[in-house]
Amino acid sequence: QVQLVESGGGLVQAGGSLRLSCAASGRTFSSYVMAWFRQAPGKEREFVARISRSGTMPSYTDSLKGRFTISRDNAKNTVYLQMNSLKPEDTAVYYCAAVYSSSWSDLERFYDYWGQGTQVTVSS
């Protein structure tokens, strides 16, 4: 089992950047596929990005390619989401998710473990 704690959210002006972190407890972090999702007010939670266990295969939702970067440091049991050129529509609660698997998915139901979320607010 793994516990996930996100940090790094906050208030930023449009065009700015933030880096979210998700620290995982427990053993064998490198055996978990990691992902970020987000939920904007009044909307369903949506996929943002995922990364393979080794960190060599990131994947993004099409609309965020080029602005967001997911990475991981298995030695630190942490996954990151670098967000650049932020827009007001990026305002949401961002969630870290994990699944103990060698495969991966963009689907919310695929992930077994979730953090509590961190709020990102982008002002215009």
Image: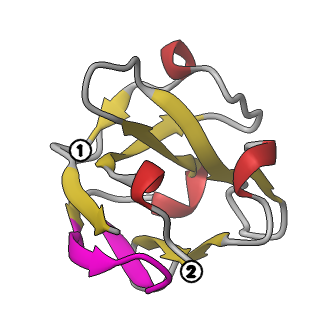
Which quadrant would residue 2 be assigned to in this image? Answer: top left
42 lies above or below 67: above
Say which of marks 1 and 2 sits in front: 2
Callout 1 crowding tier (Cα within 10 Å): few <14, some 14–19, many ≥20: many
The amino acid sitting under disc 2 is Asn
Residue 5 locus on image (x, y percent): 19, 58
Q: Residue at x 39, y 81 (%)?
A: 18
**37 or 11: which is nearer to us?**
11
Q: Under tag 2, what secondary structure?
A: loop
Callout 2 crowding tier (Cα within 10 Å): few <14, some 14–19, many ≥20: some
Chief secondary structure of the magenta portion: strand
Q: Is residue 4 visible?
A: no
Q: Is residue 45 visible?
A: yes
Q: Which residue is mark 1?
A: 115
Q: Under tag 1, what secondary structure?
A: loop
**124 or 7: which is nearer to us?**
124
Whole-number angstrom distance, CA of label 1 to CA of label 2: 22 Å
Q: Residue at x 79, y 52 (%)?
A: 59
Q: Quadrant of the C terminus?
A: bottom left
- Give the tally of numbered discs: 2
Q: Which mark is residue 84?
A: 2
The amino acid sitting under disc 1 is Gly
Which quadrant would residue 66 be assigned to in this image? Answer: bottom right
Residue 14 locus on image (x, y percent): 42, 76
Q: Which residues are magenta?
A: 7-24
Membership of 8 in magenta stretch? yes
Residue 54 falls left or right of residue 28 = right
Residue 80 falls left or right of residue 41 = right
103 lies above or below 76: above
